[in-house]
Amino acid sequence: MNQIRLSKVMADRGLCSRREADKMIQQGFVKVNGEVMSKLGTRVDSNVQISLLPEAVLARQHLITIILNKPPGYVSTQPEKNYTDARTLLNEENEYSPFDGFGHRSLPLRSLHAAGRLDIDSSGLLIFTQDGAITRQLIHPIHPISKEYIVRVNGKITERAIEMLKEDLFLDGKKLRQAEVFQNKSNQLRFVLREGRKRQIRRMCELVGLKVESLVRTRIGNIHLGPLPRGKWRFMSNNESF
């Protein structure tokens, strides 16, 4: 049986990211079948029992995840010329926390990374996190977490257009995964996707003769935008999960 790097097995099981796994292994915080492993590059069978020492569990409990309602005009990943990084909104003034109970704590912006993207013209739910396991969960194709969008369009919405949006479209030569698409109003659609290609919804709509006027992401997995105002953010609480 081919053995696999321990850090990859840990990441595949959602324990952490590969980078975080390497760090914990170096610190001697990982046990395999009851034995502490501290050598980088250790290879193991895919079915081994893996456990984290209490020090690692405690450290992971202190990792921060932020939920932001991104306005249009902000970039979510690499800052672009003349546009502002959405992380600039993560300040004390913009915190919205009637439910989280955390109180004020300083934000380590350098270690907060966007888990997925939301293009500059779109708004809504955007996740920033220190937790590599969450990032992997949200962006890795092995984890098809559903994301929901409300989309206002210009053009005539027909039954045929909706059927094509659901399961008959290709982008970049590859067939799209089946989508859920519903008409909410005469000029509004609700999309539920389980993949995230670049500007996917805008390009899908163009293929059926519709132009996107506004796009708001309202849900990622079990996390909803809810009452969070545009431009505000809150901490993700310990009892929430995707």
Image: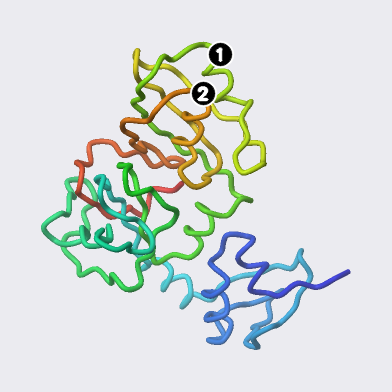
Q: Residue under circle 2?
A: 208
Q: Quadrant of residue 40?
A: bottom right
Measured from the top left, where is residue 60 in percent x and y?
A: 43, 69
- Looking at numbered disc 2 in the image, what kind of residue is underneath it? Val
Structural crowding at the residue carrying mark 1, measured as other residues with C-alpha within 10 Å and reported as few (<14), some (14–19) or many (≥20) = few
Q: Nearer the viewer, residue 20 or 210?
A: 210
Q: Is residue 47 left or right of residue 75?
A: right
Is the C-beta separation of discs 1 and 2 under 8 Å?
A: yes
Q: Residue under circle 1?
A: 160
Q: Quadrant of residue 93?
A: bottom left
Q: Examine the rendered structure and indicate whether residue 15 appears above or below residue 227.
A: below
Label 2 SS: loop
- Looking at numbered disc 1 in the image, what kind of residue is underneath it? Arg
Q: Is residue 204 left or right of residue 30?
A: left
Q: Examine the rendered structure and indicate whether residue 100 appears above or below residue 192.
A: below
Measured from the top left, where is residue 127 in percent x and y?
A: 37, 53
Measured from the top left, where is residue 101 in percent x and y?
A: 21, 54
Residue for point 32% across, 30% down:
213
Q: Examine the rendered structure and indicate whether residue 155 appears above or below residue 43.
A: above
Q: Nearer the viewer, residue 99 or 146?
A: 146
Structural crowding at the residue carrying mark 2, measured as other residues with C-alpha within 10 Å and reported as few (<14), some (14–19) or many (≥20) = some
- Check residue 172 in the rendering and tell me which mark sits there, or answer none: none
Residue for point 52% across, 45% down:
196
For the residues labelled 1 and 2, the Cα–Cα distance comes to 9 Å
Residue for point 21% across, 46% down:
99
Q: Examine the rendered structure and indicate whether residue 32 appears above or below residue 225.
A: below
Residue for point 64% across, 77% down:
31
Measured from the top left, where is residue 78 in percent x and y?
A: 38, 63
